Image (tube, rainbow, N blue to C red):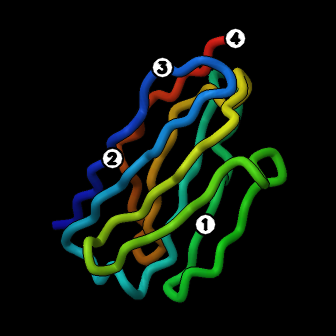
Amino acid sequence: QVQLVESGGGLVQAGGSLRLSCAASGIRFSINVMAWYRQAPGKQRELVASITKDSRQNYADAVKGRFTISRDNAKNTVYLEMNSLKPEDTAVYYCYVSLGPYWGQGMQVTVSS
């Protein structure tokens, strides 16, 4: 049974930082592309960042230079370090596993101005 357990979301002021984590079980974590998506109210779900099994990273233009995705294959965990947060980063953030695919339950990130 695949489980994705997300943590780290919450409320932060503009300019602040948050670190999201997604711990996976029930999958061969090391061979999967992992990613973070987000969905703001009234908008479509969009890719924020992805990371391949050999740690090649890809970012949405809106977050380049501010967000960093990383993975720890020994801990079956993917991270999203979010710095210089803006109100427009407010959304529900989802962890994603490519071989399934599988989605986390989502967690709210709110950036106040």
- Give amino acid for label 4: Ser
Residue 100 picture quarter:
bottom left
Q: Earlier in the sequence, mark 3 or mark 2?
A: 2
- Asked if 76 appears above or below 23 in the picture, the reply is below
* Mark sitting earlier along the chain (4/1): 1
Residue 15 percent across, percent down from the top left: 68, 27
What residue is pinned by disc 3?
A: 11
Distance (Cα) linking label 4 and label 2: 25 Å
Q: Are marks 4 and 3 in contact (CB under 8 Å)?
A: no
Q: Are marks 1 and 2 in contact (CB under 8 Å)?
A: no
Which dot marks residue 6? Answer: 2
Please tell me in which quadrant of the rendered image residue 10 appears. top left
Residue in the picture at 54% in, 50% down: 81
- Amino acid type indicated by mark 1: Ser
Q: Amino acid at mark 2?
A: Glu
Which residue corresponds to mark 1? 50
Q: From mark 4 to mark 3, how far is it between C-alphas?
A: 11 Å
Please tell me how crowded label 1 is: few (under 14), some (14-19), or many (20+) other residues with Cα within 10 Å: many
For label 1, the SS is strand
